[in-house]
Amino acid sequence: MSLTNIYAPLGISDAVFALGEEVLASLTARFEAIDRTAEANQLKVIASMQKNRVNATHFAATTGYGYNDFGRDNLEKVYADVFHTEAALVRPQITCGTHALTVALSANLLPGDELLSPAGGPYDTLEEVIGIRPSPCSLKEYGVSYRQVDLLPDGTFDYEAISKAITPKTKLVTIQRSKGYKTRPTFSVRQIGELIAFCKAVKPDLIVMVDNCYGEFVEEIEPSDVGADMTVGSLIKNPGGGLAPIGGYIVGTEACVSRCAFRLSAPGLGQEVGANLGIMPAFYQGFFLAPTVTASALKGAVFAANLYERLGYRVIPTGSESRHDIIQAVELGSREAMVAFCRGIQAAAPVDSYVTPEPWAMPGYDSEVIMAAGAFVQGSSIELSADGPIREPYAVYFQGGLTWYHAKLGILMSLQKMVEAGLLSL
Ligand SMILES: *Cc1c(COP(=O)(O)O)cnc(C)c1O
């Protein structure tokens, strides 16, 4: 059976399918490079599982306090080895990425300390954590001040302003790898390493935290390989491999991570408590799958960039740029186009394909947001999803795809819905 015949019953027109094939034909070398990175990362994960002698006892459930939870403790060793760090905290009690970042920050900042973001504003939800937008229990309420140095107009670091912003009060530097809901470039791990080295040259005792959300396994090295004291992320993004139903991780120095454990549970308890509640098989197996799942998502991002670029839209990163996270932004220019695009992603999903996404006011975000996700795990953005705040420049942020074939269908369907809404013609 020809591919067109497979796609037609799902609602993809011949014209949309043909354009997709034409774009794909030009991407062979890109896809090969993505596969090579996945191979290197897959072997890194397997080697660390072998080194830590992962076996069936590690998959057992614990309850109550979770003392002597060997599965949990060993998983943390596996993470620490993959990220090349002294310690790791990987827990279902970390509810999401924002929570992981909050634990890392609040555990390592004390009243009177200053937090510095040397690479522009942080992710939307961190504005309330830091107190840029007021919130009960923000770092600001606890007497932690915040300073920010914006990127230069060309998207590079403003080293002169950064060196001036580092004062005796500066305790912790936070660097966000991924662009988040911004249209700046995502930083490569090497760029992050240069920024870390610069900050530590100015003040050697600085703690550097990297928000690694969406970046894991996109390159062969991680921020922890280039000097980050804490590298932080969500398990319903890349490292959960689509199987983790909740969770976050913090990897880094023993000094920083043990403070995070005391903040997460309680002073005196730290890493010793926290039952795994039967979740270990999903955490181990998800981490095992994460390199190839990330590769599928990356292929989807590269395909979307090249398809929409061909149609004249501004895409970030561009179709040919190298990748440092799995997010693809497409500036669609209007609310209607964002809605049509998201309806296509939704219609291609294995779960909830029949629902229609609508813009809504979401907690933690300061403008209306539209989200399309038909996920097995609620809100999982390593599964194929698209979202974006309804504001200029009406950019939709597209990410995920547990399999490349699903990502491909979703992207074709997004274009199909835009064509059907009369927003463009092929
Ligand atoms: C997703 C994300 C977060 C927050 O993670 P949640 O799990 O949604 O709380 C923080 N920073 C970046 C860059 C992200 O992409």
Image (cartoon, grey):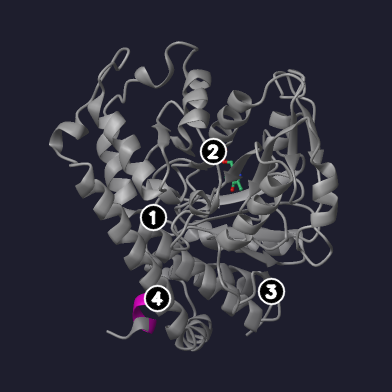
Q: Is mark 2 within 8 Å of ligand 1?
A: yes
Name the residue located 25 percent from the left edge and 21 percent from the top edge: 62
Q: Amino acid at mark 3?
A: Gly
Would you place residue 33 above or below residue 261 in this image?
below
Chain-order first, disc 1 or disc 4: 4
Name the residue located 75 percent from the left edge and 48 percent from the top edge: 118
Front residue of 414/115: it is 115
Q: Is residue 270 magenta?
A: no
| Residue furthest to the left | 56
Task: Check whether the beta carbons of the residues at disc 1 and disc 2 lie within 8 A of each other.
Answer: no
Q: Which residue is mark 4?
A: 7
Instruction: Give the prevailing secondary structure in the magenta stretch.
Output: helix
Name the residue located 53 percent from the left edge and 54 percent from the top edge: 226
Q: Secondary structure at mark 4?
A: helix
Residue 386 placement (x, y as % from top left): 57, 56
Q: Amino acid at mark 2?
A: Gly
Residue 102 placement (x, y as % from top left): 60, 30
